Image (cartoon, helix red, strand yellow):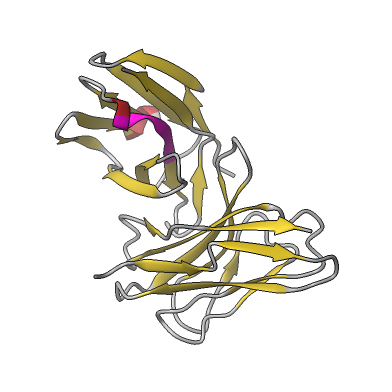
Amino acid sequence: DGGITQSPKYLFRKEGQNVTLSCEQNLNHDAMYWYRQDPGQGLRLIYYSQIVNDFQKGDIAEGYSVSREKKESFPLTVTSAQKNPTAFYLCASSNRDVETQYFGPGTRLLVL
Amino acid sequence: GIQVEQSPPDLILQEGANSTLRCNFSDSVNNLQWFHQNPWGQLINLFYIPSGTKQNGRLSATTVATERYSLLYISSSQTTDSGVYFCAVGDTGGFKTIFGAGTRLFVKA
């Protein structure tokens, strides 16, 4: 089946710790995205990548980092510089024309 | 940047009722999508509709790009329609996507 997978489903972070969220797609899409959703809120764009080895900051990139070494993978690292990381993180992908974005099931990050 | 406003913020319907959700945006956009987020958090794309009208079963959508708004129509609502409906627009490059705050719909049996 084609689709987007995210892991883990739940992630717990300790103070001062960096954590990495995985996002993989087998839709052969060029573009991938990371969003953050806080309770009762809409989605906010963290980073996006149009092609391999290229990515741009979204509206709330501070405290996050990404890499795009392979077309199918776009991992997100939440660094210790992100002071309020508790949120629901969603990954998406689209073709180069950006007509439709397809979303993964999300990762819920909680701070211990 | 582009601002996206959705209304109403909350909506409660009796099963079988019809409803209209609205999305206003502040500038020209390259694309517009409607999504449904179910209670478990999964987002499903309903429509890609930068202009014109589309229908898919009980759902239809209309975008009037020159007047900077889009409407999502839900007819004969079912309890499974409950969740949050988001409108999302793309900037002139298309890749930077801005979401509205959503309309939270609850359909009562």
Q: Residue at x 31, y 63 (%)?
A: A97
**Which residue lies at the image location 45% right of the left edge and 39% below the top edge?**
B39
Residue A8 in picture, x, y percent from top left: 54, 68
Q: In x, y percent, where is residue B16?
A: 23, 15
Image x and y of residue A4, in percent: 38, 67
Which quarter of the rendered picture does the N terminus of chain A lie within? bottom left
Q: Is residue A49 left or right of residue A98?
A: right
Q: Which residues are magenta?
A: B80-87
**Residue B43 magenta:** no
Magenta-span inclusion, residue B86: yes
Please identify the quarter of the rendering in which residue B61 is found. Answer: top left
The image quadrant of residue B65 is top left
- Quadrant, the C terminus of chain A: bottom right
- Can you see residue B8? no
* Frontmost residue, B91 versus A88: A88
Number of numbered discs on residues? 0
Q: Residue furthest right?
A: A16
Horizontal side of residue A51 vs A99, given as left or right = right
Majority secondary structure of magenta residues: strand
Q: Residue visible at 42% across and 25% down?
A: B105
